[in-house]
């Protein structure tokens, strides 16, 4: 699998201010749990590449990579969010490169896998239901039905606020 550019031509953030429009998210895995971030916070998704560690950096800074001639800082999202690490083979990991509208420096987040892009109606999103230090990174919980509409199988996906994570690094 090669690099994937996930940006549509039209930015839905400016398309309309209606509250009934679906929200587009990129779904990914950390350990065995499902998470999502806003599609418009994502510039591209790239395959894992060797990450050069940075001495004396925060524990959640995995290091840097050279992405087409630009130094890109890689954040280990599991470390940042204190998610227990059931490490998979690093070559199966993906790097979600964050859009320039979110960060002033080239930044990517390391995830175990990117599964899909979802279009989610607001009625399937619950505002965050927990409080605490790390809850500031959670925008809400997405209830995603699997299979047909009559199925009772609903997965819960934690919707993450990437701009808040980037601001917190400042």
Image: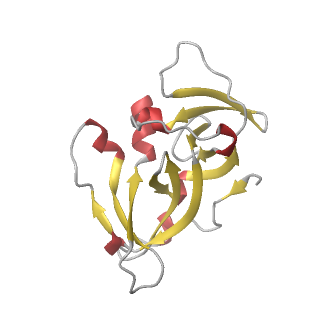
Residue at coordinates 65% horizontally, 52% vertically from top-left?
44
Residue 24 is left or right of residue 8, and the answer is left
- Residue 61 sits above or below residue 31 on the image: above
What sort of colour scheme is used for the picture? secondary structure
Residue at coordinates 72% horizontally, 36% vertically from top-left?
49
Judging depth in this view, the residue of 78 and 74 nearest the camera is: 78
Q: Position of residue 39 (x, y in %)?
A: 53, 59
Residue 4 falls in which quadrant of the image?
bottom right
Image mark count: 0
Position of the C terminus by quadrant:
top left
Residue 167 is left or right of residue 48, and the answer is left
Q: Residue furthest bottom?
A: 150
Residue at coordinates 58% horizontally, 59% vertically from top-left?
115
Residue at coordinates 39% horizontally, 34% vertically from top-left?
82
Q: Residue furthest top?
A: 56
Q: Position of residue 78 (x, y in %)?
A: 47, 37
- Residue 106 sits above or below residue 17 on the image: above
Q: Position of residue 152 (x, y in %)?
A: 35, 78
Judging depth in this view, the residue of 115 and 17 nearest the camera is: 115
- Residue 47 sits above or below residue 149 on the image: above
Q: Position of residue 123 (x, y in %)?
A: 32, 74
- Residue 138 sits above or below residue 40 on the image: above
Position of the N terminus by quadrant:
bottom right
């Amino acid at each position: 699998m090669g690099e994937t550019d996930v940006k549509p031509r039209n930015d839905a953030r400016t398309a309309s201010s209606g509250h009934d429009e679906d929200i587009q998210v990129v779904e990914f895995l950390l350990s065995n749990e499902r998470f999502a971030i806003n599609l418009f916070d994502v510039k591209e998704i790239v395959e894992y590449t060797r990450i050069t560690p940075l001495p004396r950096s925060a524990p959640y800074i995995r290091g840097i990579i050279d992405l087409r001639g630009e130094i890109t800082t890689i954040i280990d999202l599991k470390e940042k969010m204190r998610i227990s690490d059931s490490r998979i083979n690093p070559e199966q990991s993906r790097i979600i490169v964050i859009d320039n509208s979110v960060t002033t420096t080239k930044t990517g987040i390391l995830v175990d896998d990117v599964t899909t892009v979802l279009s989610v109606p607001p009625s399937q999103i619950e505002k965050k239901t927990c409080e605490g230090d790390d809850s500031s990174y959670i925008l809400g919980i997405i209830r995603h039905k699997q299979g047909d509409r009559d199925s009772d199988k609903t997965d819960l996906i934690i919707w993450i606020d990437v701009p808040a994570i980037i601001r917190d690094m400042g």
